[in-house]
Image: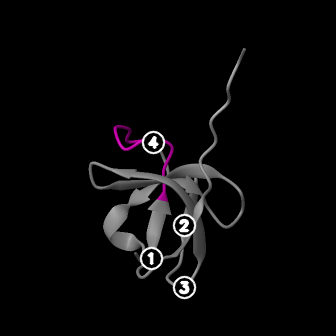
Amino acid sequence: MIASHYAEPLERVLIIDAALIASPETSEAPLASLEAGEEMRVLDISRGWAWGYGPGGQVGYVPAAAITG
């Protein structure tokens, strides 16, 4: 038997402008520039980073301090 586990994204709002990046360990160009007030659907927060879906559906990281809650 196979059991799948899914995380329900948490709706959070950016409180400051932030770059959505592919990995916190990369120096690549940002995937998107997010503005304060935009929503992000967060799947995980750890080591100072929030990982989830940006407003355009892109998946990436923003600093955890950039979001509410």
Disc 1 + disc 2, Cβ < 8 Å: yes
Disc 4 + disc 3, Cβ < 8 Å: no
Residue at the spot of label 4:
28
**Amino acid at circle 4:** Glu
Q: Position of residue 53 (x, y in %)?
A: 62, 56
**Left/right of residue 48 with respect to residue 59 in the rendered view:** left
Q: CA distance from mark 4 to mark 3?
A: 25 Å
**Amino acid at circle 3:** Gly
Q: Mark 4 or 3 closer to N-term?
A: 4
Disc 3 + disc 2, Cβ < 8 Å: no
Q: Is residue 23 magenta?
A: yes
Q: CA distance from mark 1 to mark 3?
A: 8 Å
For label 4, the SS is loop
Q: Which mark is residue 17?
A: 1
Q: Mark 1 or 3 closer to N-term?
A: 1
The local crowd at label 1, few if under 14, some if 14 to 19, many if 20 or more residues have their Cα within 10 Å, is some
**Amino acid at circle 2:** Ser
**What stretch of residues is rendered in magenta?**
20-27
When the figure is inspected, residue 4 is found, relative to residue 23, above or below; the finding is: above
Q: Is residue 19 magenta?
A: no
Q: Which mark is residue 33?
A: 2
Residue at the spot of label 3:
37
